[in-house]
Image (spheres, rainbow, N blue to C red):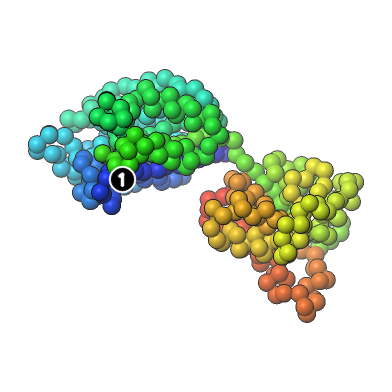
Amino acid sequence: MLFQMDIGYSQLNKKGEELCGDSIEVVHAPNSSIIVLADGLGSGVKANILSRITAKTAATMLKMGGQIDDVIETMIETLPVCRLRNIAYSTFSILQIFEDGHAYLVEFDNPSAYWGYDESLLYLKRIQRQVGDKIIKESRFEMGIGHWLVLLSDGVLHAGLGGFWNLGWGAEYVGNYLRTLAAGGYSTDEWAEKVTGMCNKFYCGEAGDDASVIVVRLRKVRKLTALIGPPRNPADDVEAVKSLTTAEGVRVICGGTTSQLAGRVMKREVQVNLMDMVSDKIPPTGQILGIDLVTEGAITLYHTLQHLMGDHKNLENIKDGSGRLARALLMADEIHFIVGLAINPVVHDPDFPVPFALKHQTVRDIADILDRLGKKITVKYY
């Protein structure tokens, strides 16, 4: 993969409404990702239903290989037109990003998306075209690592209308704020939440319209390789350690015997991190030059699995080896496990807890959870 795509979004409901009149749909096709933001006319249940129909229809048809003209014609036939205002009941923005970085953006009566690179806003050329009796704006461009694009509904631009801002927040000021956020090192979710948080501030806590923000950012793929347990055949020790030390990205070793093995092969000292005695349950981490994280094996892996099965938001407060390993795994996009099959004599001790003894099953369970979270997982056994 040339890049990793982070997608974050946040929504603010109009005052007094339980449902947002905007809808967001994200689907992944075999060679692309499709992001749709639809804005239903008005607010509440009716707007929510119509925007959901729009977003779901557009995303599904494009995923199945449909053309945008077919999508729009289908929605024109499906969605009613407001007789009073003579406008469609739902507007939309659709972004499709292909694996090679080629991007296609189509907008129908939604605010113009913002395109940027690092801390700069970029000019996005748009071509108007008529489909049926509707005018759409299309853009085709290339995205790579460092590029970002923000889709938003008009409730963002109108924030503070007649109050904090006489004419609303406005496209120019929103753009300047996005540039500030781009330089702030935020995740895409944090970025989107800060925009809707500012909208709520400008609306003085009583939003006059639904406001939705989607942030899409391309970044370098984050890789992690973990060596867990010594090989069954000692003749494979060098190969297993070399697979770790030559890997790109973050390098992790799990297991006391494994770390001693790696230190011997690498001809480097293994040290226990005595400053890491932060838990009475989890053994302290270690240090080996060239390795990013060295932990104990079975006990740490078991607790790492529990963290991954639980609430990830609390992980920042867990400073022991299991918390650090869980955070490292969640941060990675591609994870390669090198698993040694040597039998650890300690597992035959009748006093050794059964859950800790099932280390290889624990690794498989961790891999399954990470796979469901969208990580690319590979495992090699020795």
Please name the residue shown 34% across and 22% down the image: 126
Please name the residue shown 38% across and 39% down the image: 196
Q: Is residue 273 above or below residue 22?
A: below
Relative side of 309 to 240, left or right: left
Q: Is residue 142 above or below residue 31?
A: above
Q: Quadrant of the C terminus?
A: bottom right
Residue type beneath disc 1 = Asn
Relative side of 227 to 192, left or right: right
Relative side of 125 to 80, left or right: right
Residue nearest the viewer, comparing 302 with 54: 302
Q: Is residue 169 above or below residue 311?
A: above
Q: Quadrant of the N terminus?
A: top right
The x and y percentages for residue 285 are 77, 54
The x and y percentages for residue 34 are 40, 40
Asked whether residue 96 is in view, the answer is no
The x and y percentages for residue 335 are 64, 49
Please name the residue shown 60% across and 50% down the image: 316
Please name the residue shown 24% across and 42% down the image: 40
Q: Where does label 1 land, which residue?
A: 13
Where is residue 123, by image quadrant? Answer: top left
Asked whether residue 174 is in view, the answer is yes
